[in-house]
Amino acid sequence: MAGEKGKTKRWGWAVGALIAVFVAVAMTSRTAPKISFFGRSNKPCNCTQETHKYSGIVEDCCCDYETVDHINKEVLHPSLQELVKTPFFRYFKVKLWCDCPFWPDDGMCRLRDCSVCECPDNEFPESFKKPHHGLPLDDLVCQEGKPEAAVDRTLDKKAFRGWTEIDNPWTNDDETDNAEMTYVNLQLNPERYTGYTGPSARRIWDAVYAENCPKYPSEELCAEERILYKLISGLHSSISVHIASDYLLDETTQMWGSNLPLMYDRVLRYPDRVRNLYFTFLFVLRAVTKAADYLEHAEYDTGNLNEDLKTQSLVRQLLYNPNLQAACPVPFDEAKLWKGQRGPELKQKIQNQFRNISALMDCVGCEKCRLWGKLQVLGLGTALKILFSVDGQQNTDQTLHLQRNEVIALMNLLNRLSESLKFVNEMGPSTERLVEGQISPPTAPSCPIQRMWASLKSR
């Protein structure tokens, strides 16, 4: 009995001490520096809720970070996820050859992990205009080797009918050259880790930045040049996030998952890369909303009436969502660019630089990486075309013309950026704490209440 009374007495003292802590905090909160139960605000404890790391207006844009995250989570991401799975947006027409115009072929395309063998013409309907590739499900020769870098070319034979094709002056590929194109089901070829690393991969990005987006001090860059750099940096960040979020963690067991240290090392540790990701997302979103009238009335015809009506409905819901229009009606203001006498000359210069970046995608030594590189660069080129005219000239009377592949690339790019933002917003804070060693070991609680609770449990 004496032991029980002693134990009860100790618990009483502990509870009394706990109440005293709460009272002391409440009494001093008005005069002392701001304190939470988990530590001072200038050195927050790990059991607090993180505030938004990025705040205020996204640079060169018209929306703030918090609004972007909210509208992406609640409106854009769910809609885009559903949209890109429809038959119309699932198939992308692309040149997958390896013909680099900038340096000799280094043989990367002959590696089994990066190659796709050509398959019979009868895999595709006539409306595909003689695409000469395809991968039969039972063709084991085509699928030998590791699958993560090879493109799966399986198609639904009732996929879609063609659109009028117009070449995009912002990109290098001739989109009207059907003899060299093949259709790919994007749902069977997700953007993720492929094993494509090392000098060949670094050479691509080095060429993109060094030759076309020189990173001068900000005061030496005009607004237009700064925007081109930020677009490429934001796209690069998004690609890195997708690689890290869907990574081959164990090749032996084929276990896939998130590689958070890699995401931190490539993106999160550099705040400018995260900011450029937000900027690129808003830039592409502005292009989509500006082309709303065109996209609303486009023909999403794949021969499947129910699916086509669903696609058209999803597009309209995305374009005219009242929450999006109220929260961020003009994500980016393109009207402030290309002013002064150098405007047309500068636009032509940047258009040529972006064409060079587009051409570099033919130098990517991994076929699946080349697929997503080409799609996203075409999507960015389509956004540039929508916002800055089709011929690099100031002509507000021009009628917008988009071809099917441009619309597919544009929406899939927006979805890629949306996914990257969502992943960074959800996993970024915990990843930073984990990698930077800010999470205390369970055996050494760092918050006052955690320490007190641990002491109570140990009695």
Image: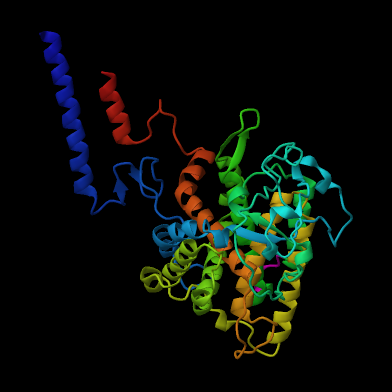
Q: Residue at x 60, y 86 (%)?
A: 399
In the displayed structure, 453 sits above or below 56; it is above
| Stretch in magenta | 215-219
Front one among 341 and 180: 180
Scheme of image coloration? rainbow
Q: Is residue 276 visible?
A: no
Q: Quadrant of the C terminus?
A: top left
Along the line of sight, the residue nearer the viewer: 370 or 97: 97
Name the side, left or right, on which 79 lies relative to 226. Answer: left
Quadrant of the drawing holding the N terminus: top left
Q: Position of residue 379 (x, y in %)?
A: 62, 66
- For residue 374, which quarter of the picture? bottom right
**Is 254 left, or right, of 41 in this rendering?**
right
Where, by quadrant of the figure, is residue 47 drawn? top left
Q: Is residue 390 left or right of residue 211?
A: left
The question of residue 40 being in magenta is answered with no
Q: Is residue 15 above or below residue 410?
A: above
Coordinates of residue 32 in the picture (x, y in percent): 28, 51
Image position of 31 with respect to 44: above or below: below
Q: As rendered, which of 319 and 138 lies closer to the eye?
A: 138
Q: Position of residue 191 (x, y in %)?
A: 62, 50
Is 377 or 455 nearer to us in this picture?
Answer: 377
The image quarter containing residue 7 is top left
Number of marks in the rendered image: 0
Instruction: Identify the residue at horizontal 46%, vertical 66% (top origin).
Output: 309
Magenta segment main secondary structure: loop
Does residue 459 appear anywhere in the picture? yes
x then y, percent, for residue 452: 28, 29
Q: Say which residue appears at 55% left-offset and 70% top-offset.
A: 283
Indicate left or right for 107 with 84 as reference.
right
